[in-house]
Amino acid sequence: MSNLRERQTISVRFKDIFYISNILSSIRIVLVPFIIYFILIKHIKIALAIATVAMVADSFDGYLARKLNQTSDLGRIIDPIADKLLLNGIFISLLISERQYMPPIWAITFIVSRDILIFIGNLYLGLHAQTIIPADVLSKTATVLICLTIGSYILEKQFYFLKIPFLSLALIFSAASAVSYGIKIHSALREKSNK
């Protein structure tokens, strides 16, 4: 069965830049260096506050895109990029500066490796099949759970009891979303080769 409903031919238009959903995604990207900076100078709670703003923006961009009929391929491209920059920027800066607030290294390695593989797979798909796989519910849920995991580690004194549940769920949804992406990318490339 075709996955055409879940994929779109890439078509980026100039006016897409001004869609509110794409502006929110762009704001999330702009916030990433500030989050990294505050982690590196050890103002972790300020970094967490800014990351929370980015998460709130993330929760609204997709909703507004659908509500205002402003879905676009630009949004499908920059939304997952914003997610990956946010999470991996936080992980790397915590690794450099504040390792005490980090989830286990093996868990971070798994999550970062999954992001890299999905990015490479989607890039390959875009170059060879001129299609993209947008973020789905599994991927978005994984992103939220990873952010909650990071928050529970940073605010360990208050939320120590949430660390393991959040981390476990984040890993489960990360693995499920990776499998989902893999199946969709494989299907898209097979359909392209059969044409």
Image: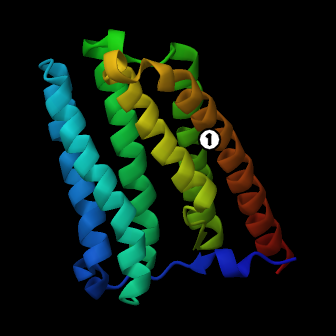
Across and down, in percent, residue 155 comes to 31, 23
The residue lying toward the viewer, choosing from 168 and 188, is 168
Q: Residue at x 49, y 46 (%)?
A: 143
Q: Residue at x 62, y 54 (%)?
A: 138
Q: Residue 135's quadrant in the figure?
A: bottom right
Q: Residue at x 14, y 32 (%)?
A: 46
Q: Residue furthest top?
A: 100
Q: Is residue 18 visible?
A: yes
132, above or below 155, in the image: below
Q: Residue 174's quadrant in the figure?
A: top right
149, above or below 41, in the image: below
Q: Is residue 37 visible?
A: no
Q: Dot 1 corresponds to which residue?
A: 174
Horizontally, residue 61 falls left or right of residue 192, namely left
Horizontally, residue 61 falls left or right of residue 168, namely left
Mark 1 residue type: Ser
Across and down, in percent, residue 116 comes to 54, 40
* SS at mark 1 in the image: helix
> In the rendered view, how is the structure colored?
rainbow
